[in-house]
Image (tube, rainbow, N blue to C red):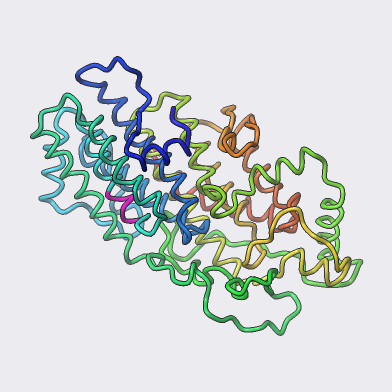
Amino acid sequence: MLQRRTLLATAAGAALSLGLGPARSATPDRRQAACDAMALWYRLVLELVRHTPTMSPPVASRAFAYLGTIAHETMAAVDPEVTSLAGRLNGLPPLPAETAAAAAAAGAGAGADAAVALAAALHAGVNAFFGNTGPTGQRAIPALGRRVMAEAARGLDPGAVSAATAAGEAVAAHVIAWSEGDGGAVVTNLGFPPSWPKPSDPWRWVPTTTIALQQAPLLPDWGRNRPFAMPAGLPCGLPGHPPYSEDPASAFFAEAKEVYDTGRALTDEQKLIARFWSDDPMLSSTPPGHWISIALQVLHDQSASPALMAEVLCLVGVAVADAFIACWASKYDYDLLRPVTYIRRTMDKTWEPLLITPPFPEYPSGHSVQSGAAAEVLSAFFGPDLPFTDASHVEDGLPERSYPGFFAAAEEAALSRLYGGIHFRAAIEHGLDQGRCVGAYAAALRSGA
């Protein structure tokens, strides 16, 4: 298996090795070829997120949802045993009849050419959603595209390759066209409004940094985007946080005191947990990318079929994308200040949290919502008690961590924000609940649900 950064560097240099060993048969196993096409594109995407300035966590979650939909709908187009999500994902129409017929013909033989179709479809999708990535990524995308297609097409009749390529590209174009009307297609100024009114109420969010761009909060309209599986009315609401108060006897003060006291007495293990799940933009694949990485690891360990792999990647992507829509809607409804603001105001003017505070309102915790949503989907596919080991940050110098199940990982991810000094407990616990609600809509779309 190629390491993530090695993949980016070698793809950019057009020297990618697919890691299949020196002895290759004339015709590779079609099932494995389809899985390899998805895995290699996704591993590159996890690295591209780090190199694309607009890829804040909400924007990255959107890209993962659409790429997953492209993979799933490509499988549905070429394999008669896979059912399309058209009409079940909000606003996704079925393929035009002519395109669907051509795709079905290209996939005659139970999806025999799914690898070629996936290679072409994901290449088109990555071009669409990462077209503004950095120069290394701009070189890596076409280089990887050539090599993945060469491997996927090896041993196949050129006519079959041409037909499957056209089918994959047609599916990608169909999904990309659908994406353009969701409200999140255009991100200007890295997602920060040019100005933001100064709050008059003491509980409202205020900037937590002197960086000029971050004097306004990130993507305040993201919660208005069209969701994927969740109904448009955003049904996964929140019970609310303790009422704002500066009274030392109040519940709000107690939550802030917990953040303060925890931050002053962190153990080495708590610091490790905070950093393991921090997943900062431009330094990582972001929180949604972390859960996509977990999904890829589990799919590999389970020797998943191409159809299952595409479905899991699609629905985990859908879950985290809907999670950020729901979470962002709630964040700007409540518009709550961050712990660092409150603690410096009421307890200790010199206090510093372990992690850098993100530039948007506090309630609820985005990490909690999207982790709860992803865990809900993965548990629906693999069961809630599947042990797994997460090696997502080994290349970043952090050791792998093992969990007895997906919700255990989600709970640790959520609690990491308390250790990092980023969130109050209500945002963590209520965020997990909101995430499970959001994730249930995505999980309900799985085959046989």
Indicate the quadrant containing the N terminus: top left, top right, bottom left or bottom right: top left
| Residue 339: image location, x then y, percent | 76, 63
Q: Which residue lies furthest to the front in this view?
A: 13
Question: Is residue 434 placed above or below 244 in the rendered structure?
Answer: above
Magenta-colored segment: predominant secondary structure: helix
Where is residue 302, by image quadrant? Answer: top left
Q: Residue furthest right?
A: 249
In magenta stretch: residue 127: yes
| Residue 21: image location, x then y, percent | 35, 18
In magenta stretch: residue 45: no
Question: Is residue 207 placed above or below 266 in the rendered structure?
Answer: below
Q: What stretch is highlighted in magenta?
A: 124-129
Please say whether residue 447 is visible from this viewpoint. Answer: no
**Residue in view at x 43 percent, y 56 percent:** 62
**Residue in view at x 81 percent, y 59 percent:** 255
Q: Nearer the viewer, residue 18 or 410?
A: 18
Position of residue 336 in the picture relative to residue 373 (left or right): right
Position of residue 109 in the picture relative to residue 304 (left or right): left
Indicate the quadrant containing the C terminus: top left, top right, bottom left or bottom right: top left
Question: Is residue 392 placed above or below 178 in the rendered structure?
Answer: above
